[in-house]
Amino acid sequence: MTPALETTGPKVRLRLEDGWFTVCDLSALLPGRGVAALLPDGRQAAVFADRAGRLHAIDNRDPFTGAAVLSRGLTGTHRGRPFVASPLLKQRFDLESGQCLDDATVRVTAYEVTAAEVTAAEVTAAE
């Protein structure tokens, strides 16, 4: 008899070039508040859950200042699109595309993000 794999609860996962990467427990995300996640290559992602429960992730680095602060920004919507405003200079970034809403020449990376049950074996393998 094969024992069932134990799950540790829903995890937030980002799609990177080489596959899915688990960043945090879904329970760590509060609507309207961001979480910074360190990625395997040393970059950071800013991960958000909106009030409707949709997940979003963009690069955490503010391209205008170079500071890794977008996860601390204020969230809102503009013409039905979710955004985060940088806490430093207040530029707004679309959470779905990464496009700066205040300067069409600037964009940050946007990640595909999902919440999924992850087995304890997958968590151990990722560590």
Image: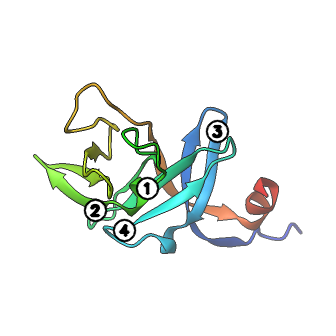
Residue at image point 65% right, 62% down: 118
Identify residue type, mark 1: Val
The answer to whether residue 63 is above or below residue 35 is above
Q: Secondary structure at mark 3?
A: strand
Which label sits in the foreground, 1 or 3? Answer: 1
Identify residue type, mark 4: Arg
The answer to whether residue 102 is above or below residue 21 is above
Question: According to the image, label 2 marks what residue?
Answer: 74
Question: According to the image, label 1 marks what residue?
Answer: 69
Which badge, 2 or 4, comes first in the chain's sequence?
4
Q: Is residue 114 left or right of residue 48?
A: right
The residue at the far right in this view is 1
Separation of marks 1 and 4 at Cα, in angstroms: 12 Å
Identify residue type, mark 2: Leu
Identify residue type, mark 3: Gly
In which quarter of the view is residue 65 placed?
top left
Question: According to the image, label 4 marks what residue?
Answer: 33
Contact between marks 1 and 2 (CB within 8 A): the answer is no
The residue at the far left in this view is 79
**Foreground of the two, 72 or 29:** 72
The residue at the far top in this view is 105
Question: According to the image, label 3 marks what residue?
Answer: 19
Q: Residues within 10 Å of mark 4 (few under 14, many from 20)?
A: some
The answer to whether residue 97 is above or below residue 51 is above
Q: Position of residue 7 (x, y in %)?
A: 68, 70
Q: Position of residue 21 (x, y in %)?
A: 63, 49
Which badge, 3 or 4, comes first in the chain's sequence?
3
